[in-house]
């Protein structure tokens, strides 16, 4: 898969942007503590049909550091500025997990930049279970155990039962490759995010919402809430999929995402 890499300087960060494939442009936004490499298995299936644009959020991969009180709104501002810098708006936009929170915030506040939206394994705000999981990750950091325990802990909550023996994709939760302060900043953003029904109702782009039936973080009920709140939305349930179903079955994920983009190209 041929790809073009470019360092892009925005007002709040410098990041590495990778473009692969040709066709309608799709911006893919990754989740908590995860860099653009985690999209590779998906992009391999999408690039023959779409121009896939991936990048690193603040604090991960080749991007500049994140400050401790990082917010989803700031990450959405980054995405908006990146889209404008590419000069090809509006783009199709997809996000997974925290990337989904960034994408929905972007679409609500910058509707002119988003042609279609896809929210995968996402929720409008953290519920009690998600808050507990995020707080436990903070404890792992505070006790200096991140290198040994963070990645397997993330896998424990991310995989469905059928994929528990697998490994997270390259670029996902690689705490040994990023400063703990940056991971803590991502935890802050994930813990403090919140989108009201009024804000969700401002999303005007056609919106796809997907969720795995075995997702115990952003559960099917949370996806149904997004579907009720976002006016022009469609909900697709992935049988047997976990929170990280995009990595469990990347070909299926890519097929669903491709169909949505081509329907709204």
Image (spheres, rainbow, N blue to C red):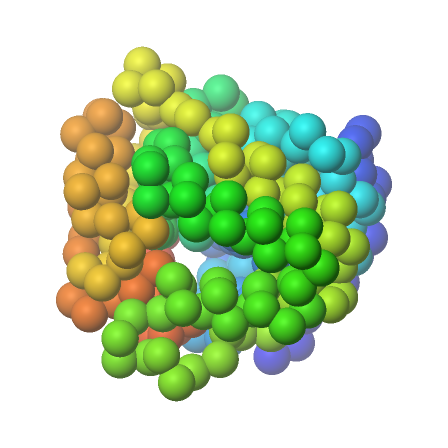
Of residues 232 and 130, the one nearer the viewer is 130
Q: Residue at x 26, y 75 (%)?
A: 161
x then y, percent, for residue 78: 66, 34
x then y, percent, for residue 189: 57, 35
Q: Is residue 83 visible?
A: no
170 displayed left or right of 153: right
Q: Residue at x 22, y 63 (%)?
A: 214
Of residues 62 and 258, the one nearer the viewer is 62
Q: Is residue 22 above or below residue 94?
A: below
If the image is split into quadrants, where does the N terminus sit? bottom right
x then y, percent, for residue 255: 31, 67
Which quadrant of the figure has residue 88? Answer: top right
258 displayed left or right of 31: left
Q: Residue at x 42, y 26 (%)?
A: 194
Q: Residue at x 24, y 40 (%)?
A: 222
Of residues 174 and 95, the one nearer the viewer is 174
Q: Is residue 226 above or below residue 151?
A: above
Which quadrant of the figure has residue 86? Answer: top right
Of residues 178 and 200, the one nearer the viewer is 178
x then y, percent, for residue 123: 34, 39
């Amino acid at each position: 898969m041929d790809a073009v890499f470019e360092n892009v300087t925005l007002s709040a960060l410098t990041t590495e942007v990778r473009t692969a494939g040709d066709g309608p442009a799709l911006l893919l936004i990754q989740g908590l503590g995860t860099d653009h490499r985690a999209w590779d298995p998906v992009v391999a299936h999408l690039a023959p049909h779409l121009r896939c644009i991936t990048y690193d959020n603040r604090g991960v991969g080749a991007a500049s550091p994140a400050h401790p009180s990082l917010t989803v709104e700031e990450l959405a501002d980054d995405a908006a500025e990146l889209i404008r810098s590419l000069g090809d708006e509006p783009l199709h936009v997809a996000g997974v997990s925290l990337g989904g929170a960034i994408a929905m915030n972007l679409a609500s506040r910058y509707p002119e930049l988003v042609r279609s939206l896809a929210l995968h394994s996402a929720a409008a705000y953290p519920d009690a279970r998600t808050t507990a999981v995020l707080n436990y990750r903070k404890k792992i950091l505070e006790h200096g155990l991140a290198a040994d325990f963070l990645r397997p802990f993330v896998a424990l909550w991310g995989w469905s039962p059928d994929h528990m023996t697998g490994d997270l994709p390259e670029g996902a939760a690689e705490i040994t490759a990023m400063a703990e302060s940056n991971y803590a900043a991502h935890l802050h953003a994930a813990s403090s995010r919140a989108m009201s029904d009024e804000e969700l109702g401002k999303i005007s782009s056609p919106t796809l919402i997907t969720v795995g039936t075995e997702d115990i973080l952003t559960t099917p009920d949370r996806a149904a809430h997004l579907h009720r709140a976002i006016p022009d939305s469609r909900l697709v349930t992935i049988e047997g999929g976990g929170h990280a179903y995009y990595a469990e079955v990347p070909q299926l994920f890519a097929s669903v995402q491709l169909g949505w983009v081509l329907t709204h190209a």
